[in-house]
């Protein structure tokens, strides 16, 4: 059987980019059971309430929902269990120091398969205030209107 190549995105957390100001991103491996991998390969996962934390020098991913595998038996996994993250020690220390400063949190942005291995993209992020969200929305609307005006001018041949 040929080895898998490339990336296959399973789930993304689009809300995270709206609610948080992303500072650093990291790619981490996931320690999963067999039925979790099968459920992810079926394209089922939710990162909505997920977060990560550092405990005793180890990184953990919590509250990420990977539903039970439909064809699993009595040894199926718990959908919202803590899962260990595979990161280098220096990365864990860097993340831990940033979070310990205050105001920062670790948010999962996406889960994907990279060359057949399950990975999660983590972000060290700071929560946005309500006025920051409104300002970002206004900037997007202004950019969209400017692009629309440019495209209509080009279409008319001016």
Image: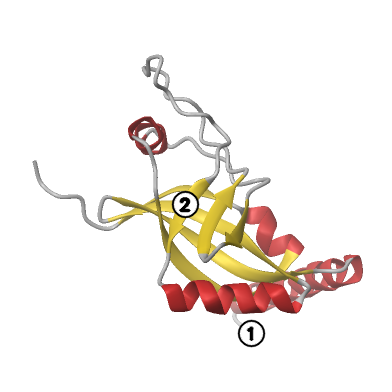
In the image, taking residue 139 as reference, residue 30 lies left or right, namely left
Asked which secondary structure carries label 2, the reply is strand
- Residue lying farthest to the front in this orientation: 56
Image point (67%, 59%), residue name: 16
Residue assigned mark 2: 84
Q: What kind of colouring is applied to the model shown?
A: secondary structure
Q: Mark 1 sits on what residue?
A: 158
Q: In this view, does 25 lie above or below 55?
A: below
Could you say where residue 95 lies in the image, as x and y percent from the top left? 58, 74
Where residue 136 sits, quadrant-wise, is bottom right
Identify which residue, 105 or 141, lies in the foreground. 105
Look at the image and tell me in which quarter the C terminus lies: bottom right
Query: Foreground residue, 143 or 7?
Result: 7
Q: Is residue 35 above or below residue 6?
A: above
The picture places residue 40, in percent across and down from the top left corner, at 41, 38
Is label 1 in a helix, a strand or a loop? loop
Give percent across and percent down for residue 12: 54, 51
Mark 1 nearby-residue class (10 Å; few <14, some 14–19, many ≥20): few
Q: Residue at x 41, y 35 (%)?
A: 36
Residue 128, quarter of the rendered image: bottom right
| Residue density around tag 2, few if under 14, some if 14–19, many if 20 or more, within 10 Å | some
Residue at point 37%, 37% (across, down): 33
Indicate whether 145 appears above or below 118: below
Q: How many labels does the image show?
A: 2
Left or right of residue 130, residue 151 in this image: left
């Amino acid at each position: 059987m040929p080895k898998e190549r490339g990336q296959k995105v399973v789930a993304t957390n689009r809300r995270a980019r709206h609610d948080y100001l992303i500072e650093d991103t990291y790619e981490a491996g996931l320690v999963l059971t067999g039925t979790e991998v099968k459920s992810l390969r079926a394209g089922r996962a939710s990162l909505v309430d997920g977060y990560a934390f550092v405990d005793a020098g180890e990184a953990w991913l919590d509250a990420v929902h990977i539903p039970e595998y439909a064809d699993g038996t009595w040894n199926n996994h718990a959908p919202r269990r803590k899962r260990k993250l595979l990161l280098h020690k220096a990365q864990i220390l860097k993340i831990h120091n940033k979070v310990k400063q205050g105001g920062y949190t670790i948010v999962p942005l996406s889960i994907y398969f990279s060359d057949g291995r399950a990975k999660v993209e983590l972000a060290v992020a700071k929560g946005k205030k309500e006025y920051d969200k409104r300002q970002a929305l206004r900037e997007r609307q202004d950019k969209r209107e400017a692009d629309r005006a440019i495209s209509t001018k080009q279409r008319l041949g001016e």
